[in-house]
Amino acid sequence: MLQPPHSSRVADVPHQRVPVRDREQDAPWHTEAVCRRDEAGLFFAPSKEPTAARLSREEAAKRVCGRCPVMVECREHALLQPEPYGVWGGLTAAERRVVLARRRRRDMELRKAARGAIAAAG
């Protein structure tokens, strides 16, 4: 999702699909985002939203993301920022925190393995 509806910034990742068609290099990824045509409120929680309503809204937002040609770019944007709120690239904020934690753990393990290989070779 591109912008929260208000002025304030508001699992394992399934197989990431490659966008269906090539886009021009000059056009920003978000110009083709399906969420630009849908209600922004679907992607960001209203204040004091009940849990059942939140889960239903998030599932509806994920369905929109599932048909978006720039889902992977959106997800990576949200992970690199990192975006603290909303559904971006088919992931909720909590799901993105899990992905980021797993990436950090993987990166630490790779660095540790590389140091071990260097020490063994030296």
Image (cartoon, helix red, strand yellow):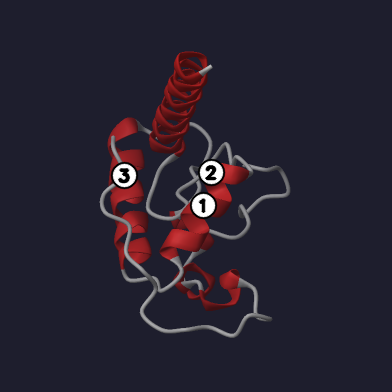
Q: Position of residue 60 (x, y in %)?
A: 31, 57
Mark 2 Cα-neighbour bin, 10 Å: few <14, some 14–19, many ≥20: some
**Label 3 vs 1, first from the N-terminus:** 3
Query: Marks 3 and 1: CB-CB under 8 Å?
Result: no
**Label 3 vs 2, first from the N-terminus:** 3
Task: Determine the residue positioned at 67% across, 43% down.
Answer: 9
Mark 1 Cα-neighbour bin, 10 Å: few <14, some 14–19, many ≥20: some
Q: Residue type at mark 2? A: Leu
What numbered label is drawn on residue 13?
A: 3
What numbered label is drawn on residue 76?
A: 1
Element at label 1: helix
Task: Determine the residue positioned at 48% across, 43% down.
Answer: 45
Q: Position of residue 72 (x, y in %)?
A: 43, 60
| Residue under label 2 | 79
Mark 3 Cα-neighbour bin, 10 Å: few <14, some 14–19, many ≥20: few
Task: Determine the residue positioned at 49% across, 76% down.
Answer: 37
Say whether residue 73 is left or right of residue 13: right
Q: Residue type at mark 1? A: Glu
Vertical arrangement, residue 18 with respect to residue 44, above or below: below
Element at label 2: helix
Vertical arrangement, residue 74 with respect to residue 21, above or below: above
Query: Marks 2 and 1: CB-CB under 8 Å?
Result: yes
Vertical arrangement, residue 107 with respect to residue 43, above or below: above
Vertical arrangement, residue 121 with respect to residue 21, above or below: above
Q: Position of residue 56 (x, y in %)?
A: 28, 47
Q: Position of residue 35 (x, y in %)?
A: 48, 68
Between 81 and 5, the one lying in front of the other is 81
Between 23 and 110, the one lying in front of the other is 110
**Number of numbered discs visible in the structure rendering:** 3
Q: Residue type at mark 3? A: Val
| Marks 3 and 2, how far apart at CA | 12 Å
Say whether residue 56 is left or right of residue 110: left
